[in-house]
Structures are given as structure tokens and as C-alpha cells.
């Protein structure tokens, strides 16, 4: 089904020409992404991950998202069947509006916000089309047991009454900065547990980078140990072992970096269709990844890709700059780091991350029936 566009004119009536512009650009998005939408079928799952930058607290000084932006975000999500979203804020109002636009066949599951300096008050969520995907009634945030806690070092300053005492470095054992979120789903014949993450970033070097790597290593070890367990708890009624897919913002630096090596440890693999530089252009970052550890021999990834956010909306053109210039914070507003405030502002409207997706085969009926008939598969 198409998205629910009813009410678009009413919601954008506060700005002259906004409804017409939004409709025109939704048509452009639909035309460009039609090849992905055409891939939707009963025999496959279109799975995506998208870090939607600070969705949508507005606490960083760049303003909240415009009503038209929520339509653009929903249009891109609608290309898929199941989307993991990171950086959802405490206020669920904008997410609820996206769900309204997506339509009644869509639902979502979200975490509570993670507090503390590392958690940043963020939620994680899964948005899914209930006509293609169903929730298997298992959901939870990952908590590491004793012996698997993340070890990192932190400088601790002396007390105020000890000005001559130098800071000391202490070793800390801790949980993830933002708790990974696991939900059990099924699409077609394929049963899987999906875990979305937003790994600690910290810094590009030193102890904070080591903590980033340690979080990834702890995550993949946790699921590898669970999957390889000999206990019956990891097997379904047919004796099949649970399949695990990890996806989200891993803050991977590059395909050759230790962060990627950590993700590909313990038997996890990034599907070749999206691995390395397969779907990324020069200048694209590698933070977002999808990695699998699947025991089902019928599992197959067919395709994958990365969506360009700004080809049709908030373009780097004189026309769009003129339209939105009045909405970009100026003067003493927040720093943008590169001097072009419009290009930074638009990432707070859409995101500084793009949706990464894969298409997974989910129809195993032929192989099942061939087995009963005593025929070779295929």
C-alpha cells in the first residue's frame, strides 16, 4: 500500500507553497526509489538500518524537523519491510507522526531512553510492516554478564581540596553506553533475532577508541557464545538454532580498520552485497553496518544498497537554499564545523546517516516440499 497522504495539505498549510513542494518531492523520491519498492514480494524481506540524527529532540540548537521532512523520512522507510532506527528521542511524537504517514499496516517496538553521558537520552526502535513481518513475542536490551563486561580506562581528577595531585587513570568495567536492543521476528519461513546498536564513539584514537572496539567485540562474542551453546534454549521445536542479525551504527571507521575486524569476529559476516566499498561512494562513511551469523543453510542475501538522502530533497542548489535559508540558524547559533550552515542544517532535518539495506530470501517452501517428496532441493 501507499503511504497515508491524507491531511498533507492541512499539515503544511502554515507555509505558502509548502504542500505543493512536498508533494512534488515525494513524487521524485517515489520515482527514484521505485526499483527498491518493486522488489517487495512474499518471498523476500527488505531489511534496513537508519540512524536518524537526533530524532527529534531539537536540543542541539538546529531546530526541530519541519512537517514536510517527516513525509520524506516516511517515504524512504516505506521502501522496506523492517527498519532499525537509532537516535530516537524521548518525545515519541515525531515517530508517531511518521507511523501515521506509513499507514495502519505498520507498527513499531522501541526501547526506553538510555540515560547518562554515553546514552545521550536516545531510544532505539524497529519499524515493521505487519503484513510481511511478525513479532515473535521476545524483546529485550542486552546486558552483559560478569566476566564479559567492557573494560576501559578513564582519567579521574583529584578532589577539589587536592589541587597538587595529578589525575589518575583507573580501569573500569561497564555495560554498553547504549544498550543494544534485540527483538525476535519472522518473515515468511525465516526466523531470526535482530539486534540494533548504536556503539559508543568516543574518539578517533586512544582509550576512547579502544572502548569503541571493545564494545563491538563484546557484542559479537555475546551472540556467538549464545548461538554456539549446546543448551536446548537456543533451539526451536524443530531443533533449529536461532539466527542472529546485528545492524545499526557501529561507528566503523573503514573496511580495513580494527572496528570492522571486531565486527567480523566470532563468525559474523557482512553480506558481500554491502561489504567494504560495494555500495558507498567516495566520501561516504562506514559507520552503519549489517552483519549476520545465520545457521539456516537456506539463508541468502540477494541484494543491498545505500539510499542517497539529498538527491530529491534539501538539495545543494540555489533554489533549495533560497527556500530554506530563513530556517537555518544563523549568527551565534550552534557551530557547524565546516562553515556551510545549510549543509549542516539539512542533516538535522534528514540525517547525517543514510539508510543501508539488504534483501533476504524468506521463502523456503520448495526446499521443504522437496525434502518431504524425497527430491533434491532446487
Image: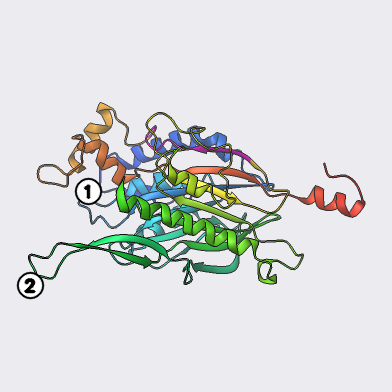
* Upstream in sequence: badge 1 or badge 2: 1
Residue on which the image places disc 2? 161
Magenta stretch? 302-312
| Vertical placement of residue 31 versus 92, above or below | above
Q: Quadrant of residue 150?
A: bottom left
Q: Which residue is mark 1?
A: 62
Label 1: state its secondary structure: loop
Q: Residues within 10 Å of mark 1 (few under 14, many from 20)?
A: many
The structure residue drawn at horizontal position 50% and vertical position 55%, both measured from the top left corner, is 103
Residue 104 visible in image = no
Compared to 373, does 16 lie above or below? above
Per the image, is 303 magenta?
Answer: yes
Give the image location of residue 325, x and y in percent: 20, 37
* Tag nearer the camera, 1 or 2: 2
**233 or 313, nearer to the observer:** 233
**Viewer-nearest residue: 71 or 340:** 340
Q: Residue reaching furthest front?
A: 165
**Residue toward you, 134 or 361:** 361
Q: Position of residue 244 (x, y in %)?
A: 59, 56
Which quarter shows the C terminus?
Answer: top right
Task: For the residues labelled 1 and 2, say whether their Cβ atoms are less than 8 Å apart.
Answer: no
Q: Secondary structure at mark 2?
A: loop
Q: At which x and y percent is residue 168? A: 21, 63
Neighbours of disc 2 within 10 Å: few (<14), some (14-19), many (20+): few
Amino acid at each position: 500500500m501507499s503511504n497515508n497522504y491524507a491531511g498533507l495539505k492541512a499539515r503544511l498549510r502554515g507555509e505558502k507553497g509548502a504542500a505543493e513542494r512536498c508533494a512534488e518531492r515525494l513524487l521524485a523520491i517515489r520515482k527514484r526509489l521505485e526499483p527498491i519498492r518493486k522488489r517487495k514480494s512474499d518471498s523476500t524481506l527488505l531489511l534496513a538500518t537508519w540512524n536518524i540524527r537526533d530524532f527529534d529532540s531539537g536540543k542541539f540548537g538546529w531546530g526541530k524537523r519541519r512537517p514536510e521532512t517527516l513525509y520524506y523520512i516516511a517515504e524512504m522507510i516505506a521502501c522496506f519491510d523492517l527498519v532499525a532506527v537509532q537516535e530516537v528521542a524521548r518525545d515519541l511524537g515525531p515517530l508517531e507522526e511518521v507511523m501515521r504517514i506509513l499507514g495502519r499496516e505498520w507498527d513499531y517496538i522501541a526501547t526506553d531512553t538510555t540515560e547518562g553521558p554515553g546514552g545521550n537520552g536516545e531510544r532505539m526502535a524497529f519499524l515493521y510492516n505487519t503484513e510481511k513481518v511478525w513479532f515473535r513475542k521476545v524483546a529485550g536490551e542486552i546486558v552483559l554478564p560478569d566476566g564479559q563486561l567492557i573494560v576501559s580506562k578513564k582519567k579521574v581528577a583529584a578532589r577539589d581540596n587536592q589541587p597538587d595531585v595529578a589525575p589518575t587513570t583507573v580501569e573500569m568495567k561497564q555495560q554498553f553506553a547504549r544498550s543494544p536492543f534485540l527483538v525476535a521476528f519472522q518473515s515468511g519461513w525465516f526466523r531470526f533475532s535482530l539486534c540494533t546498536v548504536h556503539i559508543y564513539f568516543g574518539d578517533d584514537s586512544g582509550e576512547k577508541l579502544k572502548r569503541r572496539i571493545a564494545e563491538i567485540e563484546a557484542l559479537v562474542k555475546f551472540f556467538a557464545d549464545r548461538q554456539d551453546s549446546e543448551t536446548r534454549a537456543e533451539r526451536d521445536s524443530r531443533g533449529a538454532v536461532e539466527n542472529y542479525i546485528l545492524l545499526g551504527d557501529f561507528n566503523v571507521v573503514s573496511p580495513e580498520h580494527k572496528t570492522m575486524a571486531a565486527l567480523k569476529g566470532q563468525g559474523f559476516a557482512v553480506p558481500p552485497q554491502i561489504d567494504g566499498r560495494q555500495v558507498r561512494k567516495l566520501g561516504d562513511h562506514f559507520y552503519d553496518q549489517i552483519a549476520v551469523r545465520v545457521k539456516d543453510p537456506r539463508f541468502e542475501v540477494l541484494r543491498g544498497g545505500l539510499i542517497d538522502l539529498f538527491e530529491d530533497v534539501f538539495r545543494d542548489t540555489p533554489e533549495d537554499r533560497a527556500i530554506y535559508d530563513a530556517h537555518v540558524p544563523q549568527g551565534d547559533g550552534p557551530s557547524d564545523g565546516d562553515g556551510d550552515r545549510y549543509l549542516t542544517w539539512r542533516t538535522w532535518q534528514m540525517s547525517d546517516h543514510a539508510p543501508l539495506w539488504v534483501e533476504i530470501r524468506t521463502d523456503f517452501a520448495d526446499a521443504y516440499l522437496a525434502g518431504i517428496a524425497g527430491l533434491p532441493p532446487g
